[in-house]
Each structure stands twice: as structure tokens, then as C-alpha cells.
Amino acid sequence: MKFFSSLLGLILLSSCVSETPPNVIFILTDDQGYGDLGIYGASDIETPYLDELALSGAYFTSYYSTQPVCSASRASIMTGVYSDRIGIHNAYSPGSKVGLNPDETTIAELLKARGYATAAFGKWHLGDAPKFLPRNHGFDEFYGILYSNDMWPQHPQQGTVFDFPDIELYENETPIRVLKDQTFLTQALTDKAVSFINRNKDNPFFLYLPHPQPHVPLFVDSTYRNSQKRGLYGDVINEIDASVGQILKTLRDHQLENNTIVIFTSDNGPWLSYGGHSGSSGIYREGKGTNWEGGHRVPAIVSFPKRIAANTRIDAPAMGIDWLPTLTDFTGSEFPEKKIDGVSLVPLLTQKTIDPPHENLFFYYRTNELHAVRHKKWKFYVPHTYRSLNGRVGTSDGYPIPYEMNKIEEPALFNLETDPEEQNNIAKEYPKLVVKISKIADSIRGILGDRLTGIKGSEVRPVGRIEN
């Protein structure tokens, strides 16, 4: 009997030791709003594959990008920290002298140390100088563009506001062609992703697929053109959905779907100034470039059949800073040595708890300006200026209308459970709560700083720079 018990123990131990870590696929869209998928209420865009992905796993109803702008939000995803902690603000232009410091630890580096093959196909936007490129941040392969797809000579404001150089498509560190047309790009990135899965089907892999779309200018393959009620924007989302379908089919073909984590989300809310070429923030106020709910609250879907039950709806707030610790937890990787701000979402995803991982979430914008705090069900705003269309509708021909600057003169407070549209400022009704959250805001200012108040952070790590 002891022999059989010992043998069973050895078999179980061997099984645990040899168990293959889960593959990871992280799909990121650019400027996609909360209301742009069927599962999130869109009735004018068909997204069958993403809806299926959500219903087969988990979807968040209160997930936030860390900042309402490209480079900053992507830095948080990669590192698990508020981007202000590492000195990354706004969206980098071509030729920027700053980028993601190679001394920071990224998801790719953590998984590479665990034995994963790693690849990034799409838009990088964390620095275009050599020291900041993807293969200096843990990726084995890169194919894509180094900044936003509108930073090129065809920008509608080229010559009046901007002076952009040609935008180039890169293979690793080598530019391979100048982009004059981007119609092919979504499918090309999908083909790269499928090839990477095929080549690494027998070992764990991390695939990062940050689509340049649906950031303007919009481009779609002719197969999908004029297919959606939402117009060109809807066509673009439908092609991205089809891309997800191709990737899921590849996983099924190799019987990898049960042991693969697939994450789908957006880097920030919709760029509303482009009207019909913009996404929808649904019921939420404003969009990209603001810290109102519409600027941050975006779709977030996670599928991992081995660990996540189907049709898991998560209402607890989460943020882009949480992906690194979540994937570290799921894959059994080592956590970074440097401080991170994110918290693992595994207990929420596996339904061990419904409690929020954070009591407070902080919303910065521009060059280190604290604008808002989410405290439990409350959203609190400190006085600041923000851009708004003031109810005007942008054009649908790809040319933006200008924003106006509005100002919050006094602290504002909203109950997101009863007023998710943020229409009823109840700060005067809850003076003690305003004082409490103001002190919470001051606590993060002491760490990350706040240009509006002149407070310099005490724990900020410097951004990497290039020697001139």
C-alpha cells in the first residue's frame, strides 16, 4: 500500500512539475470605446468572435485604461505601474528623445525569463530611438510601426500644425517599407500572429498584438468595407473581430485554447473629435484625452478556459496597471524587483472574490496632472481644465473639429452606481467625503507628484533618455 501511495505521489509531483505554463495573447486596440462591441451594447457593429470570447470567459464592466492617451497607458500595461512613476506622459511623437527605460521590467521580460517565446506585432509607441525598441524590452520579434498611424505626412493638419516624416514599417530594428497606404496592415499583423503561434505551438509563448486601428486614419480591407451599420469605423472593428477569430481558430487547430490566456482591451477611450470616424463611449461622459469615464472606461475581456468559468461578469473596478501582476500570477513567473502599483486580478477572474482589488484608483493626464480619483463607488475630480466638444459632433471625413477647454472650478463628486453618466455633482451634499478623498489625492501626490499643485513626487523613477 505504501508503494502505491508513493508511486501516486511521484506521478502527481511529476505532473505538477511538467505542466506547461499557459500561453498568453494580449490584443490591444487603439482608441476603441466602451460601446464598440456587441457584448458592451453595440447594435450597429457585428463582433461575434469577441462576444463569444467574452461569454466563454470573463468581461469587465468597470475596467480603466491607466491614462486616456497612448504612450502613458501602454507603459502601464507593460510595467504594472502608474506611468507617472516612470516619467512617461502623453503620446510620443517621431524622434522623441525619451521612452520606456530599459531598466524597467516588462511583461515580456518576466515571461521570457520563464522560458516563453515573445513577440510584438503592431504599434509600439514607447519610444522610437534604438534603446527603446521592443527587442530591448524582452521581445524576441517585432513587426509593426513605432508610433501612432496618423503621425505621417498625410495627416490632415500636416504643414499647419504638424511636420511629420514618413511612417515606416519595421521588422525588428530594420525599416522595411514606407507606408503610403495602411489597408493591408490589420491582416498582415494577424498573419504574423498566426505564424508565431504555429511556430511556437510546442512551447509557451507570449504574443502582444497592439493593433494600430481603430485610431484615425481608418483603414480596412476591402473584404469588410461597407459591411457595418456604423460605417467605416464599424468596418474596421469588424475586421479586428475577424482577426480575433483567426487567432482563436489557430489555437483550436493546435488544441491550445484551454491553456491559453487571451486578453482583449483598448489603450483608452474614443477620439470623439473625429465624429463618424470615432468610437463610442456608450453612456459614459467624454472620451480620449479626458479623465471623465468615457476617456478611461473601455472593454476588457479575458479568456482562459482552464481557470476562468464561462460568462463571468466582473463589475469590480480594475486598471491597466493590473495586467502584469495578473499574468505573473497565472504563469508562475517572478514578480519585478521594483515597486509596482497593480494587483493580480486572478481572484476576481477565478471567482474567489467579488471585492475590488483597489480601494482607490488615480487618474493622471498631461505632464503629471492628477485630475481624478475613484474611491469605491465614488468618482472625485479636483479642479482642472479639460477638453470637450460641448455637445458638438465631429466631422465624418477624417478631419477633426477643435476641442474647447472647460474647467472644473471646485471639487466634484459623482456616485457611479446611481449616476454612471456623471451628470449630478453631489460634492456639496457630502462634504466629509470630499475632505476624505482630497486627503487620498494628496497621498498619491506625495508619491507621484502633481504639476497643478507644484508637488513633486518622492518615489518617481526617472525615464530613460538618450545622450545627445
Image: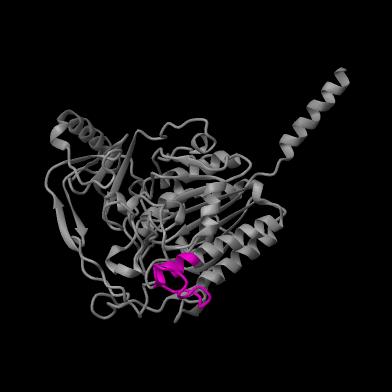
Compared with 252, 441 (above or below) is above
Q: Residue at x 71, y 40 (%)?
A: 19
Tell me, yes or no, if residue 107 can be seen here: yes
Residue 141 falls left or right of residue 395: right
At x 39% / y 40%, what residue is drawn?
Answer: 317
The quadrant of the rendering that contains the C terminus is bottom left
Can residue 334 be seen in the rendering of this structure? no
Q: Nearer the viewer, residue 121 or 291?
A: 291
| Of 32 and 346, the residue lying toward us | 32
State whether residue 297 is above or below residue 225: above
The spot of residue 396 in percent (x, y) is: 31, 73
Question: Residue 377 at what x, y percent from top left?
Answer: 31, 36
Q: How is this picture coloured?
A: one colour
Count of number-bearing discs: 0
274 in the magenta segment: no
**In terms of depth relative to the viewer, which is nearer, 195 or 78?**
195
Q: Nearer the viewer, residue 38 or 345?
A: 38
Secondary structure mainly formed by the magenta segment: loop
x and y percentages locating residue 454 in the rendered image: 18, 45
Q: Which residues are magenta?
A: 218-238
Q: Quadrant of the N terminus?
A: top right
Residue at 26% in and 69% down: 394
Left or right: where 110 falls relative to 45: right
Percent x, y of residue 104: 45, 49
234 inside magenta stretch: yes
